Image (spheres, coloured by chain):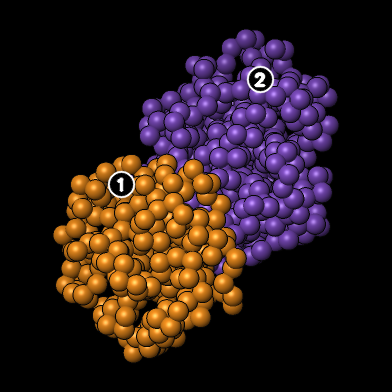
Chain colours: A purple, B orange
Amino acid sequence: MSAPRRGDVVTLGPPGPEPTGLGRFGEFGGRFVPETLVPALEELEAEFRRAWMSPEFRLEYAELLAQYAGRPTPVTECHRLSDRLGVRVLLKREDLTHTGSHKINNVLGQALLTKRMGKQRVIAETGAGQHGVATATACALFGLDCIVFMGAVDVERQALNVFRMELLGAEVVPVTSGSATLKDAINDALRDWVASVQSTHYCIGSVVGPHPFPWMVREFQRIVGDEAREQTREILGGGDPDYVVACVGGGSNAMGTFAGFIDTDAALIGVEAGGRGLESGHHGASVSRGVPGALHGARSLYLQDEDGQILEAHSISAGLDYPGVGPEHAALAASGRAEYLSATDAEALEGFQLLSKTEGIVPALEPAHAIGWLMREAGHRVPTDSTVLVTLSGRGDKDAMQVSEMLAGDRKL
Amino acid sequence: MNLESTLRTARDSGRKLLVPYVTGGLGRGWLDVVRAVAAAGADAIEVGIPFSDPVMDGRTIQEASQRALEIGATPSSIIEELTALDAGVPIAVMTYYNPVHHMGHDRFAQRLAAAGIDAAIVPDLPLDELDGWADAADAADVETVLLAAPTTSDVRLQAICARSRGFVYGVALLGITGERKELGVEAGEMGRRLKAVTDLPVLLGLGISTPAQAREAAAAADGVIVGSALVRRLLEGGGPEGAAAFVTELREGLDAG
């Protein structure tokens, strides 16, 4: 496989490994859902397995990724940032996709499946709004009805994305239950799905949820890692980067990236939301500070109190403001194949500004955590002269207003 | 007498079964509510252990759960308080899987047994994920009630009935808990499908809100579970008397059938 370039046709790599048993990644995963949903998940699993092995489906999906989403996305070498940090930084540019984040890769796949299953209505949850916008986009493209559940807190802090979703014909439902953020949006989407399951597909936006979602979403995102591996090999003259770094909320951009490098020698680093610091209790570091539990259909790592009540997460970025992580990440952490660290709100803000100033690339606040982590660790945990691939999962336009207010001191971190 | 034998005996005497749901820890006097509901004609009582993320529950039980958590209810405190209760009818706790998982299967089962609690209902633990918990529950003599849904296939329905203990919980609609103006067509259909494949007591729950709906649903099954309609009265300040009055109405509605 030669390194993909912009304008090329999209070639999918071979399907990755299936989870074992009933959606298990090690001891994590599974299908912890109300009985009402079990038949729909069985149907989805069967349909996805058939589709993912079908040359016709793969061709149709690859064409959409090329002609609609604008793939392949490039890997950009960051010369000025590299000089600044003393490590060689390469960026996988998911910010350059249509709708401005990696979320489009997954929703196009799920929209095709929705059509195959003969369903007309699609529901989705969203945190930052990127997955909501991507879902609304795919639904507009395929003529599907789209309802997006979004925490009322996020509706306020991501007003631009709310408008974009409505412009695309979606209905945005503000969620006021619980902490009114991403976790609660997933709760309300599940509640809707229990009632609407016969006519509705739930388009989950991350590698979370009951089987088959963590597996399926990883497969729809593995294009990120498969492309990046070939591209970095070309840039590095055949070798792989020393470090592969991506931000982790639920973990879909990281899982898609890691999938492409799992069989290489690259160290895999997931950067979680450190919020106001891990000791503060206000963070979204589910791998670092969570314990095993079952939420939203999967056994994984969750932030919870001593009685098993789920805690509210905190992050400057709505997309990382989730008290759990996908089960495959929990398994990668347990096996030691990937390592999960964190960057604070303040470090993410520094990363946001540094990448903008040194490379002319404004990152979303989510991948700004990966940049912020690298700023802190370059020359320390990441030795000088290392090569580092960072997945830039999305662009920062949506965050510009929020960041400008914060930098002006109008809004506390 | 455990839950199943109690319900079978009542059913076989020709009585329609009534299992009200009460959110555990909802106010200081919640055990008085349980006693009053038992005295008003319940055949067993479902006590909710509140969870932060109740995805099968509508607004009423969400609100009750949140209130109970805010005033300090925990799985341990509710089990502890139930130890002291002698309501004269079997008790089943209903909670989500995470609190069970967090306490540990064996410990949760043993604590229920030690508290004299007969059964557990865990709506996000379907048949396929049941083994770890069910083994622990069986070992502790705690009955695990499984749910069957309108979307469940006939083959699966049989497997659910074979593994369910106490009774089988027929989900009477497509959706989450909460009062409904009318009983959906799914209720009767669910009851008839379950009655055709099992001798276990078949109870229908979700959306059953009035004595008339209870009577109508029970005609296709052995009885009903009523949750949100009762919990709403508690949230509105009805207290033990209000709860007892409503359960008396439900009982009369069922007996009139």
Which residue: 20% across, 53% down? Answer: B141
Is B60 left, or right, of B89 in this rendering? right
Which residue: 63% across, 49% down? Answer: A202
Give the residue at mark 1: B133
Is B49 left, or right, of A343 in this rendering? left
Residue type highlighted by circle 1? Trp
Instruction: Please determine whether, in this image, residue A239 is positioned above or below residue B155.
Output: above
Q: Position of residue A104 (x, y in %)?
A: 71, 40
Can you tell which of label 2 and label 1 is closer to the viewer? 1
Which residue: 18% across, 74% down? Answer: B86
Residue B43 seen anywhere in this rendered image of the structure:
yes
Q: Position of residue B39 (x, y in %)?
A: 27, 82
Q: Quadrant of residue A362?
A: top right
Which residue: 56% across, 26% down? Answer: A259
Q: The residue marked by circle 1 belongs to what chain?
A: B
Instruction: Please determine whether, in this image, residue A277 is positioned above or below residue A330.
Output: below
Front position in the image: A50 or A292: A50
Q: Position of residue A143 (x, y in %)?
A: 82, 49
Give the residue at mark 2: A13
Q: Quadrant of residue B4?
A: bottom left
